[in-house]
Every structure is written in structure tokens, then in C-alpha cells.
Amino acid sequence: MKPSRNGHLPINGLSLYHEVYGELGTSKTSPLLLIPGAFMATDSMKSWVSAFAGKRTVIVFDQQGHGRTPDTSRDMSYEQFADDAAALLRALKVERADVMGYSQGGGVALQLALRHPTLVNKLVSLSATYRQDGWYPSALEGIEGLSATAFAGMPVEKAFKEHTPDATAFDTYLEKMKVLGINDQNISDAQMRSISAKTMVIAGDADAVKPDHALAMFKLRGGGDEEAAASGALQQVPAARLVILAATSHIGIFGESAVLVPMVSAFLDDVTPTTPDLF
């Protein structure tokens, strides 16, 4: 599948690479902004793009130092990456978008909804946390142990060196990414409650994200329905949705687009499952 438009835009001191699938401004359906995870680029999102693009316009981009977007001396933070995403949407003249992010991209999506609420219609967090203690300690230890040799000959290194062949630049980028990953972000419970966008929280039961953290996020976003509990059926479209996939790891969940896209699409379209007539 080929993008209808792609290229670099000057965004907050970056030469930010982006792709658009479909036409902007021609549909009543909000475009969907997909934000890849750490070390990932637009190319990694192809299965997700193709699954969504039949019904809605899709936008994807490479974050600072990722894929075709060169790194700069600028610091990295979830807040800065969210501001980049907001600037991209404004440059594309998108007034409001649905936003879905995976892992690091999910954290960026949360910051985008917090910092630029008028731009975000609905929010999907895929295997992401809103603060550091949402990860298992072993996941953070794994990030801390990363070295350039782990990426030798890998697509991450190849993509980076296509635009920045200096080996020391890749090492610098990797160290910045390690700091970003280990420090994570620190969104308060009050801030999570304040997000205006309806939210879908997705994680695997063998994820790097703790299941109780995903549940906490769901509750803070208004999840749980006592009326439905009392009657056994939904009376209204829920404010938040929660998906926990069985026997699914942090990397494994990214390969489950065939399972997850119909559920995400139903959320974006405010569709709920049909309640069977039992009695």
C-alpha cells in the first residue's frame, strides 16, 4: 500500500518524516494518527495502516531520530514528542484526530491528549504506561542494558545511518533513547482523569506493562459501569474500554492487528457488541 502523500516537514527543529494514507479533509470520520514505539518507524506500521486505511485516513510519522527523521542535539521527552505530533497535525491542517500509539508511542499519545486536548478526538493506548511504575522492573533493566552492538546490522541502525552515517551519532541517539525509556514519564492520577478524549486501553497478559496498571488506567479514564453491572447490559456507549489479550507479550501484541483492529475500529465508531436476548 502506497501513501497518498509523504515527505519531510520542518517541525520544532526537526526534519520530520510523515506519511498520509487517504485524503485529508474529505471525510466525516476523523483521521487516525498512528505513533510507533521506541526504535520503530513508519515502515513497521504497514499491517496496521492497511487494516485501518479502508475506512479512515491514516497518518504515521517517524519520531526524533527514528526511521527517516534525523536526530538533533535536542533533548528527548514524551512531552516534546507529543508537541511534535501536535505540530505535525497542525501543519497538515488536521483540526481533530483519533490517536493510537504503541509502547513509547502510547505514552506520547497520552501526552498529546493531555497537552493538546482540542486535537485529540479518541485515544488508544496499546501496551503503554502513564508512569514508570507501570512497567515490570525487568523491562526497565532490559532497556538499561541495551548497547549499539544489539542493533548492529538491524533495520534500526540501517535506517539511522542512511541519513546520519556518523557512528558516534547513533551511539548518542541510543543513549538518549535509553534515558527516555528508563525515566519514562510521570503522569499523575489527576491528570489521567482530566483527559477529555474517550480512551481504549490495550495490553497483553504477559506484557511488559503490569496488568494492574492497565486496569488502573482504564478506571482513571472512567472505565467500569455499575448500571451495566446491575442490568447485565450496556445502557450507553462506555467512556473507556479495556482489552487484555491472553498469552500475549509486549512484542507479541504488536503482531495482533487482525484481532485488535476490529475492536479498535468499533471503539472509534462508538459501536458496542450486540446484547443477546437471553430471557
Image (cartoon, rainbow, N blue to C red):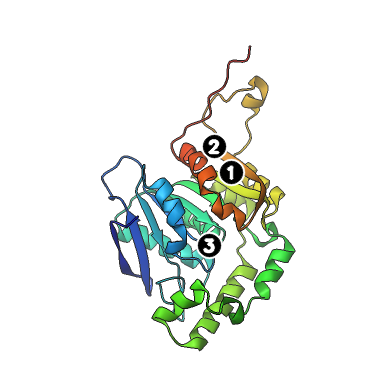
Residue under pointer 3: 37
Q: Position of residue 210 (x, y in %)?
A: 70, 53
* Horizontal arrangement in the rendering, residue 54 relative to residue 82 (left or right): left
Residue under pointer 2: 239
**Element type where label 1 sits in the image:** loop
Query: Residue at (67%, 74%) from the top-left corner?
Result: 144
Residue contact between numbered discs 3 and 1, judged by CB atoms under 8 Å = no
Residue contact between numbered discs 2 and 3, judged by CB atoms under 8 Å = no
**Three-letter code, disc 3:** Gly
Q: CA distance from mark 3 to mark 1?
A: 22 Å
Residue contact between numbered discs 2 and 1, judged by CB atoms under 8 Å = yes
Residue under pointer 1: 221
**Three-letter code, disc 1:** Arg
Q: CA distance from mark 2 to mark 3?
A: 25 Å
Query: Residue at (45%, 67%) from the top-left corner?
Result: 63
> Along the line of sight, which residue is nearer the eye, 249 or 20?
249
**Three-letter code, disc 2:** Ala
Observer-side mark, 2 or 3, equals: 3
For the residue carrying disc 3, how many other residues have a C-alpha within 10 Å: few (<14), some (14-19), or many (20+)? many
The answer to whether residue 75 of the structure is visible from this angle is: no
Q: Position of residue 124 (x, y in %)?
A: 51, 48
Q: Position of residue 138 (x, y in %)?
A: 73, 65
* Res 59 quadrant in image: bottom left
For the residue carrying disc 1, how many other residues have a C-alpha within 10 Å: few (<14), some (14-19), or many (20+)? many
**Element type where label 3 sits in the image:** loop
Q: Quadrant of the C terminus?
A: top right
The answer to whether residue 16 of the structure is visible from this angle is: yes
Q: How many marks?
A: 3
Query: Residue at (58%, 81%) from the top-left corner?
Result: 148
Q: Is residue 93 above or below residue 166?
A: above
For the residue carrying disc 2, how many other residues have a C-alpha within 10 Å: few (<14), some (14-19), or many (20+)? some
